[in-house]
Image (cartoon, helix red, strand yellow):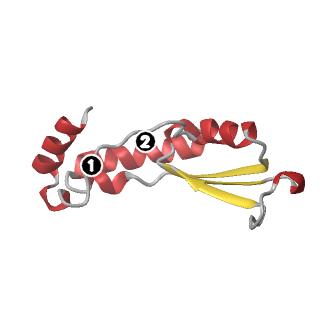
Amino acid sequence: MGPKWQKRLINALRPDAVEETGYPAFFDHCTSGDMARVFEGVGFEDVQVRNFYRANDYFAFFFPAFVAATAFENICKAFGWTYFASGFVISGRKPAGERGRGERGRERGRC
């Protein structure tokens, strides 16, 4: 869905959030598996990912959708379906010989 439709839907379904959301967004490598491969591809070691499954508050305005989203997220978490994670935190360590000046060797990213 493009930004134009996104703004319309947010305005119709969540008018109190219009000022906070609805900006154009561009995503790339936004699954935990994709991002782990990117980290490893640029030389990070000990890549660790922690997935989160709590985006159901987006549907708080409509209780049946909230319940369906919560059920879906719980199923995804139970089966380890990381593709459907609503967020994740990833960390990795650069080998000592590859660190630049001033780096601590531990980098974090969030999508």
Q: Secondary structure at mark 1?
A: loop
Give percent across and percent down for residue 40. 75, 40
What residue lies at 60% left-to-right and 42% top-to-bottom? 32
Which residue is more in the foreground, 94 or 99?
Answer: 99
Name the disc covering residue 59, or none. Answer: none
* 94 relative to 60 in the view: left or right: right
Give percent across and percent down for residue 88. 56, 52
Q: Are marks 2 and 1 in contact (CB under 8 Å)?
A: no
* 87 relative to 103 in the view: left or right: left
> Of all residues shown, which one is farthest toward the right?
97
Q: Secondary structure at mark 2?
A: helix
| 44 over 107 or under it: above or below | above
Quarter assignment of residue 19: bottom left
Identified by mark 1, the residue type is Tyr
Which residue is more in the foreground, 85 or 107?
Answer: 107
Task: Kindly identify which residue carries mark 1.
Answer: 23
Quarter assignment of residue 7: top left
What residue lies at 66% left-to-right and 38% top-to-bottom? 38
Q: CA distance from mark 2 to mark 1?
A: 26 Å
Which residue is more in the foreground, 101 or 104?
Answer: 101
What residue lies at 74% left-to-right and 67% top-to-bottom? 102
Which mark sits nearer the N-terminus, 2 or 1? 1
* 105 relative to 19 in the view: left or right: right
**CA neighbours of label 1 inside 10 A, class few (<14), some (14 to 19), many (20+):** few
Question: Of the residues tagged 2 and 1, which is closer to the observer?
Answer: 1
Task: Kindly identify which residue carries mark 2.
Answer: 72
Identified by mark 2, the residue type is Phe
